[in-house]
Image (cartoon, rainbow, N blue to C red):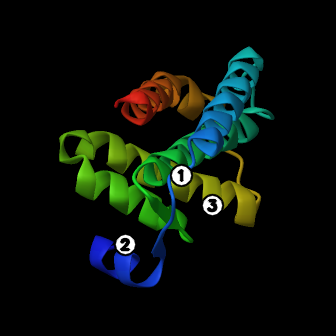
């Protein structure tokens, strides 16, 4: 989604809430540790992939919050990231693709092949690490 539309229709200014940001970071860390411990097979791959998306989405939420913004739309979280961190366009595109897969899992009962998760797990973890660093930067 275009950032201009997002800003007009889905973004509001809020006060930066350091405690909430810290809480989101902690929950994402717990969720990531949980996801990493799960055995990847044909039944679990979709659920673990959803977990990676939820972690990334929440980290994007925290990144906006750090900058005094809140979004009512997942696509606008990604749009914000792509607009404000142009050096990470590749990562933003991966997140956008992951959002589509997560939606198919949630709304269509889609099962992904375990090979998809095995191939992309390190990319997801790289993006998570990147977002955590961006959030923690002064």
Q: Nearer the viewer, mark 2 or mark 3?
A: 2
| Residue shown at 42% from the left, 25% from the top | 126
Res 50 → quadrant: top right
Residue extending farthest left: 87
Picture coordinates of residue 138 (x, y %)?
Answer: 34, 31
Q: Which mark is residue 61?
A: 1
Label 1: few (<14), some (14–19) or many (≥20) C-alpha neighbours in 10 Å: many
User: Gap between marks 1 and 2, in whole Å?
Assistant: 16 Å
* Secondary element type, mark 3: helix
* Mark 3 lies on residue: 103
2 vs 135, left or right, is left
User: Gap between marks 2 and 3, in whole Å?
Assistant: 16 Å
Res 108 → quadrant: bottom right
Dots 1, 3 in contact, CB < 8 A = no
Q: Nearer the viewer, mark 1 or mark 2?
A: 1
Picture coordinates of residue 99 (x, y %)?
Answer: 53, 55
Which image quarter holds the N terminus? bottom left
Of the two numbered discs 1 and 3 on the same chain, state the one appearing first in sequence. Answer: 1
User: Gap between marks 1 and 3, in whole Å?
Assistant: 18 Å
Res 136 → quadrant: top left
Picture coordinates of residue 87 (x, y %)?
Answer: 18, 40
Residue 32, placed above or below residue 69:
above
* Secondary element type, mark 1: helix
Picture coordinates of residue 100 (x, y %)?
Answer: 53, 58
Residue extending farthest right: 43
* Mark 2 lies on residue: 1
Of the two numbered discs 2 and 3 on the same chain, state the one appearing first in sequence. Answer: 2
Q: Nearer the viewer, mark 1 or mark 3?
A: 1
Dots 1, 2 in contact, CB < 8 A = no
């Amino acid at each position: 989604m275009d950032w201009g539309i997002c800003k007009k229709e889905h973004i509001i200014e809020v006060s930066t809430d350091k405690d909430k940001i810290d809480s989101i970071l902690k929950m994402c860390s717990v969720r990531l540790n949980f996801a990493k411990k799960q055995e990847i097979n044909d039944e679990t791959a979709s659920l673990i992939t959803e977990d990676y998306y939820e972690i990334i989405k929440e980290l994007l939420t925290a990144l906006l919050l750090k900058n005094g913004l809140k979004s009512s739309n997942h696509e606008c979280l990604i749009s914000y990231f792509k607009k404000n961190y142009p050096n990470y366009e590749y990562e933003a595109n991966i997140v956008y693709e992951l959002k589509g897969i997560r939606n198919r899992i949630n709304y269509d009962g889609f099962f992904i092949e375990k090979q998809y998760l095995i191939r992309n797990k390190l990319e997801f973890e790289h993006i998570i690490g990147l977002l955590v660093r961006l959030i923690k930067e002064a």
